[in-house]
Image: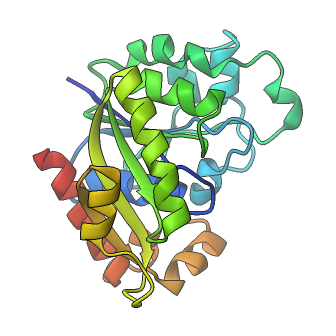
Amino acid sequence: MVRIIGVISGKGGVGKTTVVANLGLALTTKFNKEVIIIDCNITTSHLGLYFGLHSVTTTLNNVLRGEAIIEDAIYMHESGLKIVPASLAAHDLIGVDIIMLEKTLERLFGKADFVLLDSAPGLGREAYGTIIASKEVIMVTIPYSPAIIDLIRCNQVIKELGPRALGIVLNMVTRDRYELTEEEVSNIVGLPVIGSIPYDKNILKSLALRTPLLNYKPKSRASKEFIKLANRILEL
């Protein structure tokens, strides 16, 4: 049975797409899972850029408009990871309704072990559509109070819409004294911290090279934590 996991965040800039790209790669290359990652951030799509997908013929936008089936929008990375990008063109926003995503994903049943949905940040229509389409949800944040407070609202919406909340991934962690600890974050939001990714300048370099960190620096501290996160999700 495919596990459809929405990856959401209360605000932008916390590294949610970085987590999706590297988590998907870890599940594929380290645990031999069939994984499809989908860019559900229609208005500001970035996921494809992490893999050098700048100009592709078919995107999630075409699928949601009924112009193609989702299999037509899947692109294979050299690692075996499969990516469904969203369009980078502004005119491709016309006629696209992310709420149709749940029905669209039915075609992937039995064709993957994991489908990771890279949500738009916040709690707008794109995020709602992603949560509705998900069976499980991971929340990504940074260890500072404003970002954590946003997760409280996210958790409330998840409870209302029904998917299982797996927990929180803390990103860009430096362990400075002014950061909230994993225990503090867990107590505030009411969910476990299932991953803690350290701040790593190599992530910025990997973005410039258009390849996930796990490809660029597989032995870096952050890469090792992405692998640990993948293993933890397999256990949940």
Where is residue 109 drawn, in percent x and y?
A: 31, 18
Residue 210, by quadrant, is bottom right
How many marks on residues? 0
Of 81 and 17, nearer the camera is 17
Instruction: Specify whether 76 is left or right of 5.
Output: right
Where is residue 33 drawn, in percent x and y?
A: 23, 44
Look at 63% across and 56% down and name the residue there. 12
Look at 64% across and 17% down and name the residue there. 64
Placement of 4 over or under 107, stated as above or below: below
Determine the residue located farthest toward the right in the rendered image. 91
Placement of 223 over or under 95, stated as above or below: below
Placement of 3 over or under 100, stated as above or below: below
Where is residue 133 drawn, in percent x and y?
A: 44, 22
Where is residue 208 drawn, in percent x and y?
A: 66, 74
Image quarter where the N terminus lies is top left
Instruction: Specify whether 66 is left or right of 70.
Output: right
- Image coloring type: rainbow
Judge whether residue 201 can be spotted in this image: yes
Judge whether residue 15 can be spotted in this image: no
Instruction: Specify whether 121 is left or right of 149.
Output: right
Residue 185, by quadrant, is bottom left
Of 53 and 95, nearer the camera is 95
Of 236 and 72, nearer the camera is 236
Determine the residue located farthest toward the bottom in the rendered image. 177
Image quarter where the C terminus lies is top left
Look at 52% across and 32% down and name the residue there. 74
Placement of 48 over or under 58, stated as above or below: below
